[in-house]
Amino acid sequence: MTDRLPDTPVAQVEPANPLLATWETPFGVPPFARIKPEHFEPAFQAALAEHEAEIGRIATNPDEADFDNTVAALERSGRRLTRVAAVFYNLTGAHTNKDLEAIDRAISPMLAGHRNAVYQNAALFRRLEAVAATAKGVTSAEEAQVLDRYRKAFVRAGAGLEPAAKARLGEIAKRLALIGTEFAQNVLADESAYSLVLEGEADLAGLPDFLRDAAAQAASERGHDGRHVITLSRSSVEPFLMFSARRDLREKAFKAWIARGEAGETDNRGLIAEMVQLRAERAKLLGFPTFADFRLDDSMAKTPSAARALLDSVWKPALRRAEAERAALEARMAADGVNGPLKPWDWRYYAEQVRKAEFDLDESETKPYFQLDAIIDAAFHVAHKLFGLSFAERRDLSLYHRDVRAFDVKNAAGEVVGLFLGDYFSRASKRSGAWMSSFRTQEKFDGDVKPIIVNVMNFAKAREGEPTLLSFDDARTLFHEFGHALHGLLSDVDYPTIAGTNVARDFVEFPSQLFEHWLEQPEILKRFALNYRTGEPMPDALIARILASRTFGQGFATVEYAASALVDLDFHSVTSADTLDVAAFEKASLARIGMPEAIVMRHRPAHFTHVFAGDGYSSAYYSYLWSEVLDADGFGAFEEAGDIFDPATARRLKQFVYSAGYRQAPDAAYRAFRGRDPDPTALLRKRGLAEV
Ligand SMILES: [Zn+2]
């Protein structure tokens, strides 16, 4: 197939397309202002053809296979495709529109088919096996690792199988790509279609100023000037559920929130059934009993039973804690004159009241101290203290939305490290959640390429002229994503295949979750949590109360999360899914684990984008907890050193984790940093579940 394609430089095919031109911009930032939706399809077509031709040349090279003419050649191939895809998928996530969505549905299966054809290429696979056998041209441990990652990817795509099985895997990959795309688009459609319009003071009962302001802003963005709107973005609906004294409105908002992807044209359950079936078939073709076995074979946990064992170890203590929490909340509700039982839409509201009573803590008291800009500065400060990085905002770049900010990142020697983009505010064109992504990955085997890393959040934007205020959880999310960003920015490897966050999925949350620990340090809060009205630092007593309340509500949080992770594993542990009834399966799965009635899983299947909008966290949602074993234990290295910025510990952390990509296996990387394996009891202690 590849030899039929014209071997023509792409620039001659479509020179007017800005996606295919050379980008003479700082860091090679895409020329967003010139890129129009109609440029993507021809750019993808040209870039795909170019990559196919490159792959054909590598596979049919008459010279004996060696590292450079096979592995490094693969690393050099598909440059333009990688670049176009990075622009496209960053936009479909952070700033999409109907045109891009239509292109996504057309392109995603095509890309999946292409990827499959590359990784199933028999001649190429033979050359990789030959390099592995002779080690010809392999000059470093890193090169051996890159070769190994390629061989694994080829085997996992079915390169070693018979033609019929390969063809079926190709069909499955294309279909999965299409329905994964549709899944994400359905969730976004439900989220952007929904507005809970609040009319008058009665509807606003209990809402603090920051939430009223954000709801007014959301209303004006949606054409309801002068009113207030609650959206299904977590940063809007969650505080509403915490504060609204109107039980009927809480119920309404909550039910809409958990029903995303479950009705009418955007019902995702048929897609889930098909996806689960196709994934099971794919695993079977590749010689695994279930998709979970297949997926976890290339992870730190290695087997579904290891992942389940970890989840099970927190499940029972979390259930016991959640039951105690429920009883306390129900008592509070009764004191409020509302007779039980406590419903899911009551949980956050009464939890906030109990938290206030127990710790004298009130979200509206802490929120004025968490200004978005100050928390960004705090994250930069920690990166400076740990790794010597400095950040300077630049305003000369034209990015994909006016709210996106850009920062030059330099190291202690003043050398350029990369470009960091921050896209912080919620908008209708953005998917929900928070994530890190890249426009360009670090590498240096063929010239020094500096990364362009982006953090995307969904914070509710304050009114014009007002500072955006975060909850402590929002601030933690910012630190989390910034930890991922540092993993991308500090990457210092030769080859892009193992750069930055291209590590095992259940290890990738370690650098991000570890970074969250610094937000909780009094030294950081004292310096960056400044009252936006007075500029006063957060009082010591308030800091103490925040830190004392850290493990409050961990029964709920752990149950909510672990239920999603267990249901994810259940869906992907089926051996055949011919007649999967998604609603019944979810129900049975939750019944099996004894899910409390008053708690709804953090992500119900129909909007579980981690797992069903592509393969990101499919049967891998447990990864957060797996990585938490590492971060709970890992931060102890700084505490034991008696300095949260201990230079020697920070150096090891950078060398073996943040800069190391996938240079070595994750357990070896952790041991190199910590000097030993993680102590699993640190996780239960961190969540305050150890003594129950
Ligand atoms: Zn993460």
Image (spheres, grey):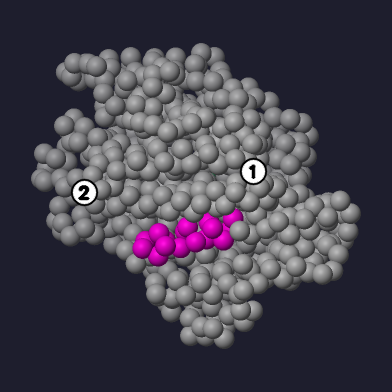
Instruction: Name the quarter where the N terminus is drawn.
Output: bottom right
The answer, for residue 529, to whether it is visible in the render is no
Q: Position of residue 482 (x, y in %)?
A: 54, 51
Residue 186, percent from left and from top? 33, 50
- The residue that appears at 24% across and 59% down in the rendered structure is 221
Horizontal side of residue 172 vs 341, given as left or right: right
Q: Measured from the top left, where is residue 663 in percent x and y?
A: 75, 49
Q: Is residue 109 magenta?
A: yes
| Local SS, label 2 | loop
Asked where in the image residue 12 lies, by quadrant, the reply is bottom right
Which residue in the structure is indicated by mark 2?
A: 195
Check disc 1 and report its element: helix, strand or loop: loop
Q: Which residues are magenta?
A: 101-116
Q: Is residue 130 above or below residue 3?
A: above
Q: Is residue 34 visible?
A: yes
* Residue found at x 83% / y 56%: 131
Q: What label sits on residue 504 in the rendered view?
A: 1
